[in-house]
Image (cartoon, coloured by chain):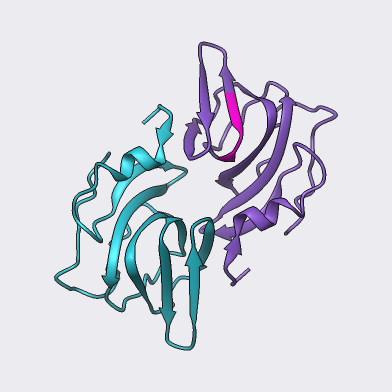
Chain colours: A purple, B cyan
Amino acid sequence: LNKVIHIQEKFEQIGELWHPHLLAELNGQQVKAARIKGEFVWHSHADADEMFLVVSGNLTIEMRDRQVQLSAGDMFVVPRGVEHRPVAHEETRILLFEPVGVINTGNTEDTLTRKDLPSI
Amino acid sequence: LNKVIHIQEKFEQIGELWHPHLLAELNGQQVKAARIKGEFVWHSHADADEMFLVVSGNLTIEMRDRQVQLSAGDMFVVPRGVEHRPVAHEETRILLFEPVGVINTGNTEDTLTRKDLPSI
């Protein structure tokens, strides 16, 4: 992983929507890339704050008491324990920053759960 | 900090070159923004891997045995303990991801050392 990471090129290597892929690991944290479209599943991560950075497209992060809208170049941190549901009305490319070991659907077991984390 | 962070707008709030400003904190890590131009100082961080993400411009990261070139949309991780010197021939805007408490010039005391970390 000790190379320059060209973010846009990495997204071309991702096939499945909502399946995070590993870009980098540092200080016990991982940087992941995902292509998303549609509505994800409600979930939370008990021990992990989760940062979203939108590279292209638009992302809504629904929480139980509010929602936020992110466009390309926007970041948002969902604090640990906060239930959230990402929604993208068009194909959207995001980076995720979170501790090693976080599963995409958190406390929720779902058909969208992916426990493998391919490196790209 | 529980708001959407519009990265480009944040850079407009940064005056001094090479002075990192705090955008977000999560899981014991900090996300910082910096405007840079020219040659920084050689330094290393004994206990911190440091990730650079170039938002605009071009960044060379010199290390003792090699160098890497980053353009907008590129990331690179400098592993802990590795001496490095960032160089930007034009004004360049970068994000930094590293543990709480990292000082910009690491083990090197210099006129460019900034121990304060303004939140923007």
Furthest-bottom residue in this view: B65
Quadrant holding the N terminus of chain B: top left
Residue closer to the observer: B42 or B55: B55
Total numbered circles? 0
What residue range appears in magenta? A55-60
- Residue B101: within the magenta? no
- Residue at image position (43%, 29%) is B4
When the figure is inspected, residue A18 is found, relative to residue A60, above or below; the finding is below
Q: Residue furthest top?
A: A65
Q: Name the residue nearer the viewer: B47 or A60.
A: A60
Q: Is residue B96 above or below residue A50?
A: below
Residue at x 30%, y 56% (from the top left corner): B35
At a point 56% along the width and 12% down the height, the residue shown is A64
In the figure, residue A93 lies in which quadrant?
Answer: top right
Residue B113: image quadrant is: bottom left
Image x and y of residue B7, in percent: 40, 41
Q: Return the residue nearer the eye: A52 or B59.
A: B59
